[in-house]
Image (spheres, coloured by chain):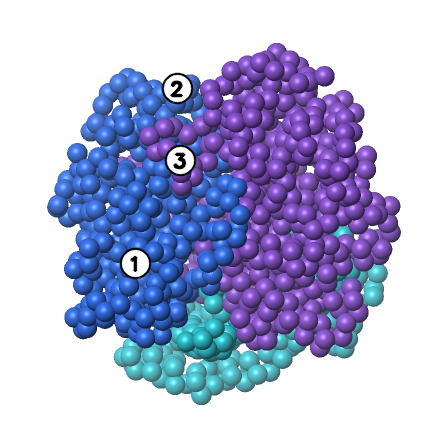
Chain colours: A blue, B purple, C cyan
Amino acid sequence: MTTLAASALTVHFGHGDRGLTAVDRVDLEVPEGATVGLVGESGSGKSTLARALCGLVPAAGGEVLLDGAPVPKRHGGRAVDRRRRVQMIFQDPFASLNPRMSVGEAIGEAAAAGRGGARRGARREQVRRYLELVHLDPELAGRYPSRLSGGQRQRVAIARALAARPEVLIADEITSSLDVSVQSAVLNLMRELRGELGISMMFVSHNLATVRYVSDHLAVMYLGRIVEIGPTETVVSDPRHPYTQALLRAVPRLGASPAETAADVELGDPPDPHRPPPGCHFHPRCPVGPQAVPERTICVEQDPRDGAADRPHRTFCHFASSSPGRAPAVPPREEQFHVARDR
Amino acid sequence: MSEPSTSRFRQALRTPVGITASIGLAAIIVLAIIAPILWSDDAAKLDILAASQGASRAHPLGTDALGRDILYRMLVATRLSVTLALLAAGLGALIGIPLGAIPALVGGRIGKLVTGFINLSVAFPTLLVAIFVAAIIGVGARGAVAGIGIAIAPYFARLSQTLSASVAGSDYLAAARMLGVRRVRLLRRHILPNVAEPLLITVTIAVGDSLLALAGLSFLGLGVQPPQYDWGRMLSEGLSRIYVTPVVALGPAIAITLGALSFVLFGEVLAKAAAGGGAPRWTRTDLSALPVLPAGPPTGDGDAIPVPDVLAVENLTVSFPGGSVPVRGVSLEVAPGEIIGIVGESGSGKTLTAMAIADLLPAASQLTASRFTLFGKDPRSLGEAERRRLLGRSLAVVYQDPMSALNPALRVGRQLAEVSEVHDGLSKSSATQRAVDRLGSVRIANPAARVRQYPHEFSGGMRQRAVIAMGLMSEPKLIIADEPTTALDVTVQQQILQLLREVSTSGGSAAILISHDVAVVSQLCRRVLVMYAGRIVEELDVATLVIGPAHPYTAALVASVPTMESDRTQPLASIPGRAPSPYDDSPGCPFAPRCPRASARCTDLMPPLEQRSAGHRVACWHPLQRGAAGTPAGVAVEDVAV
Amino acid sequence: MTAAPASIGAQRNWWAGRTRSAYLFRRTARLLVSLALLLTATFFMIHLVPGDPVRAALGPTAPASLVAERKAALGLDKPLVTQYVDYIRDVLHGDFGTSMTTGESVTEVIKQRAPATFKLAGIAFLVAMFVAVPLGVLMAALTRDSRRRGVELGFTAATGGLAAIPSFLLAVGLVYLFAVTIHIFPVAGRAGFSSYVLPVAALALAPIAALSRIVRVEGLRVLEQDYIRTARGKRLPARIVYVRHALPNTLTPTLTLAGLLLGGLVAGTVLVENIFAWPGLGTTLVQSVAEKDYPTVQALAVVFGTVVLLANFAVDIALGVIDPRSTILES
């Protein structure tokens, strides 16, 4: 199968004072057959990154690589087929289905793209197969989206994406507009499909527990940058970036008293993404950064991604530690050395 | 054309207005075709002896200066009037629609330039532009059509621009692009079907407007020139004789009005059908036939439950005209200082229950309850002023979306201070002082500066803090928080929950926390009510919720949400099917169709909310055994029901 | 570092002030560009006339020497660029040339006639605003939450009908009713207060209908907003809910529409002036178009166009002052 990768991918919206760097030099890889979870809060740029990977928003810098080769930007010819290999499922199934096309027509169109033009009779059979694949009644093929429930629509959207026979599937907040009892069914379906079809997948969500449940790798995004990435279990059990640690503590847990989880989550409000803080974007809210330890000025001055390759964990933090929020007041020696070397 | 929209249009055209518009339009089209064939000669017949007459038997609408019959001329003029209007509207559409599509197709600087040009040209009144264009091209029918066509083009451009922008930005177009669908097909299958309908409707309305504008131009002598004549020209000729024979002006005036109205009305009927679609009609349900939840047996010993003097409701039902009953027989009690949680999915009735308690139900709804005591009084029995005083000082409400809950046009301080001004009679300055104090107490930094700001200068978390502070302006005995953290980020969510807890403990006020998220509710509350299809199906404490709820719905709800501890190798529990609509009044348990444990009894008979143990009530014929939530579903062995 | 939170407020205020002045700057720039476009368009107007405009104006029987003489007087024999520069310079000096039919100074004609038109349009605008806004708000308050279906139906039917009838037909009807049948007001002319009644009514009725409908719909939309529920949740008296919380939020769309309305009223005067023989710019316009008096038509295009642009500019500025969000939300 296929590897999808972003290399120093940057997406910029607007210009001047209203300008916004939604995705800031992101390196990310979706390995063959694996699921990468991308988690972040609103304004983190996770959806923009997903769209940029599909070529739906133009990159201001960097590139998207499919099997190591850049995806052509222009339409037509071979570019069309390379585009088809990466498909996306959108957050809102009420907006992602053309209201003027029946379920069968929508899936049929995608199937046509996937097979390079099959016969009409065969097309009908394909539509039927894909509807069954997502556990929908094939009779629904004649329906228009307005007659379907939210959960049914999202299944149709999944079936449409699969019908194009993609090699990489990008799922952007696909459960967040659904009701609780429907969400789990869609999550189960995604897991099942991954097992059956062996598709590489990127799963984008604001919900850490959901992302953890479906992903092999976990990337945490904050204000346009990936701050931590690693195997899901490692990131969840041993988070190194203070933001990841805070995010993990903030996940509401059944029956846990809020004192347990919330007492040390006092992050303040996220900054305006139009004017992200210099250096490490997280430093104004960071419990181990200059707010807590004033001599850690490097956080304000230097992007923690510089020199990150030299650090053991792929965490973009100058002072990454495994003990959440209990960093020593005075930085240890080696870190001071580290700072000096970086300069 | 898609199947649902055709039926919608057919339905819309069958309304009285639709029928009138259709008949009018049909009549005009028929007249435009046949009138010149039948009556051209009659309309041209000169009768100098009968010149400039008023209404008579021979000439019902009088005659013109050359003695020609005005009625015949009016009928014959239909063709020219309508044809010119069609041409003008067509020309406008032809220029405007492609122009408006440019920004979406090209984008960038050129797109912005075109958008700016459209915005500028829309500001110019149609008639003025038409006159100036007619002045260039030359006075006459051609000039008038061109003038009006060009003058209305900006309106088409504006519409086409917004439509194309919305389609171009749509997810379904993005999906089609990713499939590599070819441009021609994109246009034919994805773009045109979604823009054609509103554009056609606008063309129809534009024909009516052009008819009026053309009549206006002809009336001014700048349109159709003799010997040709249209309705506007005839009106202008008639007006000069309005003192002597008013009827000659009346005929053309009526023709113009009716002609234009038919097109405009027809267009609007279509537009209404396209926009609304309308909610499906539901059959009216007889409310009295609704199964009322039997009240559970009186609690054995009163020690377990504290004296409820904050809130007590029994059999609360909220219904809407048309047979929708989203809240059905809910009973709940809240003791002082207690925080209870209500959990349910969308449509479970949890928000309406809260709004019913807060006296904030929509006007159309109807509330019934066998008992309703809030702070020791029944709010229904109080007068308007008294109720306002009671609720205004003792009840605080926190809403789901802090972005829309604050008034964007008023400073935050104003919105807080007015509470104390109205209910505590504080002066403006001391009320503002209190607002600063309360904003500080919800940990908003620099409150003295913040009170002077508008809500859009606050972040989402700060707005929710401000809403909470608003509730604290007096000393509330009950805080109702309806999904207070749903619209917020996780890191902010915990802060708000923590704040709510602090506020409740330090002020000693009770609280009702409503959420779709079991985990959120379980963090803050000791007692949780689970709602499904407008009813409370289980009432339990958090410990029981964690160990294992008794109602299969509660169990499934808990198990279906992935947690940080979920086994990633196992599928999540899921609930098949969907919740019944609030119109549904089948007799059995509302969860029965989706329940793996349901028996015939469940579909026939509503289970009452029964006491199971202290503080644990459940409405189920086959409840789960303690700790059995995760076990495979089977019919319960035990049967605790009466 | 501890001072950081305190500085946020100040920073945001500074930012708000900056966006506002940037907004004013953008709007002024837009107005100037629009005016330049308008002048250019009116300049080319005369060159777009098919055939020879002077010949067309003077008629086929006019001697060739006269045509050439007029052309020279109008400067049409000079190179296009020179003509353009001259035109812009003259217009900026308030000189619109001389009429091709009467030989009078166009500027003088406009000076004479403009007051009558602007007075009529201005009065009609004020009447429309003062009637329509309170009416719309009242109707919104009365018919909120689908109450009083009868009142709603009557209002929408009446205003719908009125808005659909064009002002010139309405004028004819008014003349017939009030001047011909019962002689309360004069049929035509401009002499004293009573002569204003019918023209103003003819001009203002349709805008009143249209505007009050929009105000009602806007009012209903605002009354459904969450922040109105919040205001009710605070148990504020109905008066405060409507006046303090609902009304300011209906201003933005109302003002936007009012700008279009003002432009429309100036145009509406063209028809109404002709019916009531009102000695204003509208009658001049129709006459000059019919007589192909191009310099006058050109000048009137500049005047009417400028009025429309200024009206829109005024609304934009008013919006920027009243609604702090509009300066940020736009673009």
Of A337 and B245, nearer the camera is: A337
Q: Which residue is mark 1?
A: A321
Label 3 vs label 1, nearer the camera: 1
Between the C-alphas of marks 2 and 1, the distance is 53 Å
- The amino acid marked with disc number 2 is Pro
Q: Which residue is mark 3?
A: B566
Q: Residue sitting at 74 percent across and 67 percent down?
A: B420
Residue B587 in percent (x, y) is at 68, 19
Residue B479 in percent (x, y) is at 68, 52
Of B509 and C116, nearer the camera is: B509
Q: Which residue is mark 2?
A: A138
The numbered mark 2 sits on a residue in which chain?
A
The numbered mark 3 sits on a residue in which chain?
B
Of B604 and A132, nearer the camera is: B604
Is residue B424 visible to us here? yes
Between the C-alphas of marks 3 and 1, the distance is 26 Å
Q: Is residue C163 left or right of residue A142?
A: right
Q: Residue sitting at 47 percent across and 49 percent down?
A: B89
